[in-house]
Amino acid sequence: MRLELGKIRIRSAAFGNETCIREGKLWIDKEGLVALLKEDPRVREVEVDLAKPGDKTRIIPVKDVIQPRVKVTGKGQGFPGLTTRMETVGDGRTHALENVAVVTTGRIVGFQEGIIDMWGPGAQYTPFSKTINVVVTIEPVEGLKEHQHEECVRLAGLKAGSYIGQAAREIEPDEIQVFELGTITGNAKKYPQLPKVVYIEMLISQGLLHDTYIYGVDSKKILPTLIHPNEILDGAVVSGNCVAACDKITTFQHLNNSVVLDLYKRHGKDLNFLGVILTNENVTLDGKLRACGYATNIAKMLGADGAIISEEGYGNPDTDLMMNCRLLEDAGIKTVLITDECAGRDGSSQSLADCVQQAKAIVTTGNVSALVVLPPAEKIIGRAEAIANLAGGYDGSLAADGRITCELNAIIGSTSEIGYHNVTTKLY
């Protein structure tokens, strides 16, 4: 597969009579976007707003973040299996708007949604304080069940991303990145001396609004599967969960998976990148044994020398992380784990819910329990009182003057376990 990703840098954005890009400025037809999203009979009201870096704006509760994109050549428009008919992706050319994101918000679905502050101390912890955010507030009709509510908002965000992305179809990119991996057997002959490394990406998939979709399939219904990294970078994996905001992998982060991008940079230089194994995180012991054993067998069949494993979430998924580690290490495959920590507000508590002796190389992406104080905002998009129900918030988090005291748990992307974030932890 050969994927060309054309990046179009956006310097500013505003609402206008049509959705287009002129000289680096994105114009958005708000009425057209609202009309499109209201075609879903489950959507009662839609509001569209802009939040720009440096604005004293707070977005809460954030559900998902999506990068506007359009497929220019090759198969797979939109998000196949969800917003468009099923076609595999990863070939051809895709244009992506840089420095822009669609952010969805509205009435809270699950208690694990999050915050984006566009300024101040909160902005330091989320990568989405640096993007021009097209904030889509969705109010569904009354009477929807939680999963119907989540699906309604999720699809609205994906459609909005595709709608805005269409503006990039005829624009000449500022930069074109090429992703081409070659075949596993061909690379083995081409790079016989390089260690063969596979990336195992654990996806939150525990139900209770903890879902991730692969070509529209709920990942808790799959066995671990080998996928070409280009497919991930081109829209095959979509977030559909209300897991803790700090380590929720948004759709934007799937499209720009840091581990995949870093492995591509090193492929053919100091390692041979075999591909990606997508695996799920289970709530039953049998489910964990099945998924971890199956993922290990795929890695063994590929002839992997090493594996990078990233987690999504914490607590119960720590068991899946460690089981994957133990089985791979016992099979002679060296592992590096990427996880955040839940170490208490003072950082002195046990960081992970589970651990094994084989876990000798662990990259930490920060402590989800660290406490932060967010100053009052001049503008709120959403509902500030939602903080009382967010993971990392509590009854009393919101002060009378609008100040919020909460854990990093509540800030979108603050401890991303694929490394798409701003912090880590150092040992002294």
Image (cartoon, grey):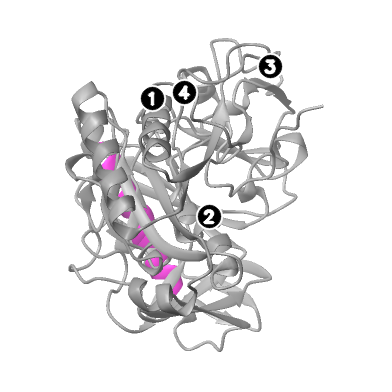
Work out how far the residue at label 1 is from the one at label 4, CA to CA, in angstroms: 9 Å
Q: Which residue is mark 4?
A: 356
Of 34 and 276, nearer the camera is 276
Work out whether residue 165 can be spotted.
yes
User: For the residue carrying disc 3, how many other residues have a C-alpha within 10 Å: few (<14), some (14-19), or many (20+)?
Assistant: some
The residue where tag 2 is placed is 259
Which residue corresponds to mark 3?
Answer: 347
Can you say whether 337 is above or below 92 in the image? above
| Residue 176 location (% of width, % of height) | 56, 82
For the N terminus, give its image quadrant. bottom left
Write down the region rendered in magenta.
149-165
Q: What's the residue at 53%, 23% (across, down)?
A: 387
- The residue carrying mark 1 is 319
Magenta region, main secondary structure: helix
In the rendered image, the vertical position of residue 332 relative to residue 8, given as above or below = above
- Frontmost of labels 1 and 3 is 1
